[in-house]
Amino acid sequence: MYYVYILRCSDDSLYCGQTKNLRRRITEHNFDKNKSAKYLRGRLPARLVYSEKCRTISEALKREAEIKKISKDKKETLVKNRPAKKTVL
């Protein structure tokens, strides 16, 4: 199982990514500067606001690319309509 996720950064920007282990990846973003995305430097802490499951890495990469192409307003709508499950982290 793979996950596509959106994080809300401290500057209110949104970051989209994909991973096989959602809990580990969020922890890496927030606490391990060597494994975090460069975009997030200076924008931490970042909190999970959206996630969805994908069956394959290919599906996850395609979905991540789709989300990255849409405007911030559409991403906000996506987050509002289907927030991340609070039990994930």
Image (spheres, rainbow, N blue to C red):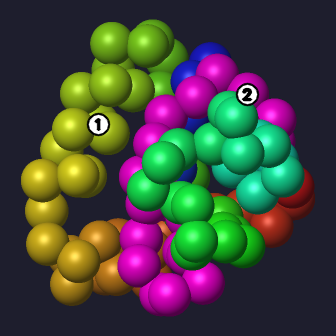
**Quarter containing the C terminus:** bottom right
Q: Residues within 10 Å of mark 2 (few under 14, many from 20)?
A: few
Q: Residues within 10 Å of mark 1 (few under 14, many from 20)?
A: some
Inspect the image, locate mark 2, and give the three-letter code of the amino acid beneath it.
Answer: Asn
Q: Residue at x 72, y 45 (%)?
A: 33
User: Element at badge 1?
Assistant: helix
Q: Residue at x 21, y 84 (%)?
A: 73
Number of marks: 2
User: Element at badge 2?
Assistant: loop
**Quarter containing the N terminus:** top right
Inspect the image, locate mark 1, and give the three-letter code of the amino acid beneath it.
Answer: Arg
Residue 83 part of the magenta-drawn span: no
Residue 37 placement, left or right of 84: left
- Residue 38, visible in the rendered structure: yes
Image: 23 above or below 70:
above
Sequence order check, earlier mark of 2 and 1: 2
Residue 69 placement, left or right of 50: left
Q: Quadrant of residue 43?
A: bottom right
Task: Say which of 37 and 59 sits in front.
Answer: 37
Magenta highlight range: 6-25
Image: 8 above or below 33:
below
Q: Position of residue 23 (x, y in %)?
A: 81, 42
Q: Position of residue 70 (x, y in %)?
A: 13, 62
Write down the residue under mark 1: 63
Write down the residue under mark 2: 21
Q: Position of residue 59 (x, y in %)?
A: 33, 20
Image: 13 above or below 66:
below
Q: Position of residue 54 (x, y in %)?
A: 47, 27
